[in-house]
Amino acid sequence: MIMGCGRVGSSLALTVEQRGHSVAVVDQNADAFRRLGPAFAGRRVTGVGFDHDTLVEAGIHEAHAFAAVSSGDNSNILAARVAREKFDVENVVARIYDPGRAEVYERLGIPTIATVRWTADQVLRRLVPEGAVSEFRDASGRVVLVEVPVHEAWVGRPLSALEAAAGVRVAYVTRLGQGLVPAKGMAYQEDDIVHVVVADERLAAAAAVLAAAPEEGA
């Protein structure tokens, strides 16, 4: 579900639909839906994106993910909090224009994308996680730096355990919107984003290990 059908919201809606997902778009201005074009098969719901009845009409109870990308910071964060806290939507992201406020909301547990560092790819990573995302590759193509999804069962385990099990090196962790270089004994925490360095030939196997619950003794 996407709140806001401006250039960002409409582009995001079409991209997500092209990937095979069902999409509902909410906007206060019915004319905004023209940006979606006639081929868009998802729902178009006119209303306020944080209003209970509007969200229910748009199908919030069946939503796997929610992106608030309207032009207002307050509306976006309120809608994101309603989606997560009231309707228990699993993947929620809010677009925030003020980077300082974005950091505050990150600390409240709401993933945010500040305009100064926003790209559609970043929103899609959080809205529809689809495995490891390459961030850097060396000139030979043999070594890659990737953002990898980590199973929640790893929470509380040291990053060294992740490294040993997957055969990777944790380069850094994004926690509450801040990048952290791993210190000795540092453990994986809920909502951490883990960035690892790994041999390209090992990437698929390593990603599979971290996406699954750790084996006994790991």
Image (spheres, rainbow, N blue to C red):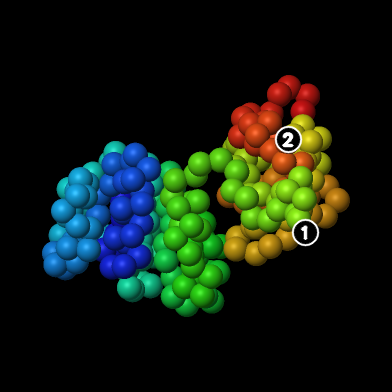
Query: What x and y, as percent, mark residue 50?
Result: 27, 60
**Quarter of the figure with the C terminus:** top right
Visible in this render: residue 21?
A: yes
Is mark 2 in CB contact (under 8 Å) with mark 1?
no
Which residue is depicted at the point 36% across and 57% down?
A: 12
Which residue is depicted at the point 17% across and 63% down?
A: 34
Badge 2: residue crowd in 10 Å (few <14, some 14–19, many ≥20): some
Query: What x and y, as percent, mark residue 165?
Result: 77, 32
Select label 2 or label 1 by which is in front: 2
Please identify the quarter of the rendering in which residue 6 is found. Answer: bottom left
Visible in this render: residue 83?
A: no
Query: What x and y, as percent, mark residue 193?
Result: 62, 51
Badge 1: residue crowd in 10 Å (few <14, some 14–19, many ≥20): few
Element type at mark 2: helix
Element type at mark 1: loop
Which residue is depicted at the point 75% across and 54% down?
A: 138
Extreme residue toward the front, this view: 140
- Above or below: residue 123 compared with residue 91: below
Q: Earlier in the sequence, mark 2 or mark 1?
A: 1
**Amino acid type shown at disc 1:** Val
Write down the residue under mark 2: 202
- Above or below: residue 33 compared with residue 18: below
Instruction: Give the alpha-carbon distance from disc 2 to disc 1, as whole Å.
Output: 22 Å
Write down the residue under mark 1: 181
**Amino acid type shown at disc 2:** Arg
Extreme residue toward the right, this view: 184
Residue 191 badge: none
